[in-house]
Amino acid sequence: MKGDKVEIVIDTGGATKTYEVAATRAGRRVEVVNRRGLVEVTELTRSGSAVRTARFMASRVVALVEHPADDRPSRSASGAADPERAARTAGRVPPRRGSAVPSQPPAGPDGEAGTP
């Protein structure tokens, strides 16, 4: 997902060096694979084609930090967030009529649902 990134910290002997691989466009993702003594971080397209790959010796990797993309509400063309959608996802606005969510009977004094 665009915005995902992975930071890799490598031991270079006397110091450390940091590398970053990020999903730079919509529909791209970052995948981390650890096999045969190598850590491989790859940016992939929707179809799975590798855009860029970084390979490091596993014995030299000090830290590998994954930063997922923010899950903020999408913005409209004017740049403002959709307030109705944000309120609905926060649970402040009741669902629209005709929703497929079945209603449940009210709970009794012992906390269990009543019998019909």
Image: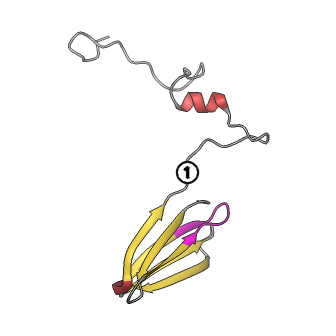
Q: Position of residue 70 (x, y in %)?
A: 55, 51
Residue receiving disc 1: 70
Q: Which residue is most to the bottom? A: 13
The quarter holding residue 20 reads: bottom right
Vertical placement of 30 versus 1: above or below?
below
From the viewer's side, name the closer residue of 48 and 89.
Answer: 89
Region of the chain picked out in magenta, as a range: 21-30
Horizontal arrangement in the rendering, residue 31 relative to residue 13 (left or right):
right
From the viewer's side, name the closer residue of 102 and 62.
Answer: 62
x 61%, y 41%: residue: 73
Residue 73 covered by magenta stretch:
no
Q: Position of residue 57 (x, y in %)?
A: 40, 87
Horizontal arrangement in the rendering, residue 54 relative to residue 65 (left or right):
right
Q: Position of residue 23 (x, y in %)?
A: 60, 66
From the viewer's side, name the closer residue of 17 and 64.
Answer: 17
x 60%, y 32%: residue: 86
- Chief SS of the magenta region: loop
Q: Position of residue 92 (x, y in %)?
A: 53, 23
Give the residue type that dot 1 points to. Answer: Asp
Residue 26 covered by magenta stretch:
yes
Quarter of the C terminus within the rendering: top left
Vertical placement of 29 versus 42: above or below?
above
